[in-house]
Image (tube, rainbow, N blue to C red):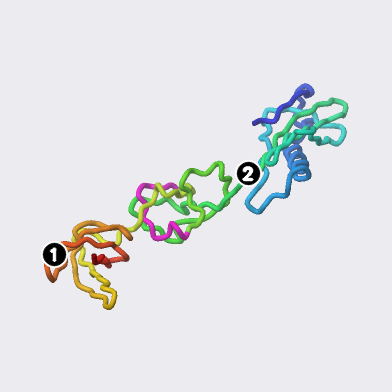
Amino acid sequence: MLALCLTAAMPATSGDEQDLGQLETLARSEATSQLPPLTDRQRFVVGPLNPHLHLTRCSRPVTPAVSPGGHMRDRILVELRCSGNSPWHIYVPVRVVGTSMVTLAARALVAGTVLTDKDVRVEQRDISQLPPGYMDDPAVAIGLTVSRPISTGSVITNQYLVAAKAVQRGQTVTLVADAGYMTVKMAGRALSDGLINQRVKVENLSSGKVVEGIARSEQVVEIILR
């Protein structure tokens, strides 16, 4: 929503124009006095003011005001009024937006990259501008594999990542079976790729029997005894 100018003087030369940045600061200050205090995960968004808006520099201090019912819990409409030689007034919207830490790509990442702490960085962003599936904790992304290219500075979402493969087809693995009173380990061969905690089929190299297990960590498959 752009600031609305109801009454303005004729366009002025740049030296005689009102500083729009100062008007934004004034509107933000008025919002601060009218709305509840912000949390550390909130901030004000002012305007934006139309950059083509030309207002004659006010010969008196610009006064802010908010009409009764002119604000809600998370937004406010501030009237800025000049009562100088060339009077004008505009309405400037100010809203409260929530923010969140978000994980970004610290460099260009190609498909197949297993993320490390050097591949990511964090930044605070408006929640309303974040894509679905964004990650607010970079630790969640570390160790996952990039499934498609990610450009530098892009928000990393769960759609870009897959869990790293714990085992790969044809790989020799350790089969672990917990019988309750004892744990048995044996050599096996993976018959399919498997992510962490994903079911995979493996061949017991001692018996030749094909069984199903769960990939628990790199090269380790847990056999579930029935």
- Compared across the picture, whether 9 is left or right of 196 comes to right
Could you tell me residue 58's position as x and y percent? 83, 32
Q: What residue is at 54 percent from the left and 42 percent from the top?
A: 129
Could you tell me residue 89's position as x and y percent? 79, 28
Amino acid type shown at disc 1: Lys
Q: Earlier in the sequence, mark 2 or mark 1?
A: 2
In the displayed image of the protein, which residue is found farthest to the front? 226
Q: Identify the residue under disc 1.
A: 209
Mark carried by residue 3? none
Mark carried by residue 97? 2
- Compared across the picture, whether 76 is left or right of 65 comes to left
Amino acid type shown at disc 2: Val
Image quadrant for the N terminus?
top right
Q: What residue is at 81 percent from the left and 36 percent from the top?
A: 64
In the displayed image of the protein, which residue is found farthest to the top? 10
**Closer-to-camera residue (111/76):** 76
Q: What residue is at 70 percent from the left and 30 percent from the top?
A: 3
**Closer-to-camera residue (49/183):** 183
- Compared across the picture, whether 129 is left or right of 82 comes to left
Could you tell me residue 80's position as x and y percent? 79, 33
**SS at circle 2:** strand
Mark 2–mark 1 Cα distance, whole angstroms, equals 59 Å
| Residue 185 sits in quarter | bottom left
Label 2: how many residues lie within 10 Å, few (<14), some (14-19) or many (20+)? some
Label 1: how many residues lie within 10 Å, few (<14), some (14-19) or many (20+)? few
Report the magenta residues as a range: 139-151
Q: Residue 41 colored magenta?
A: no
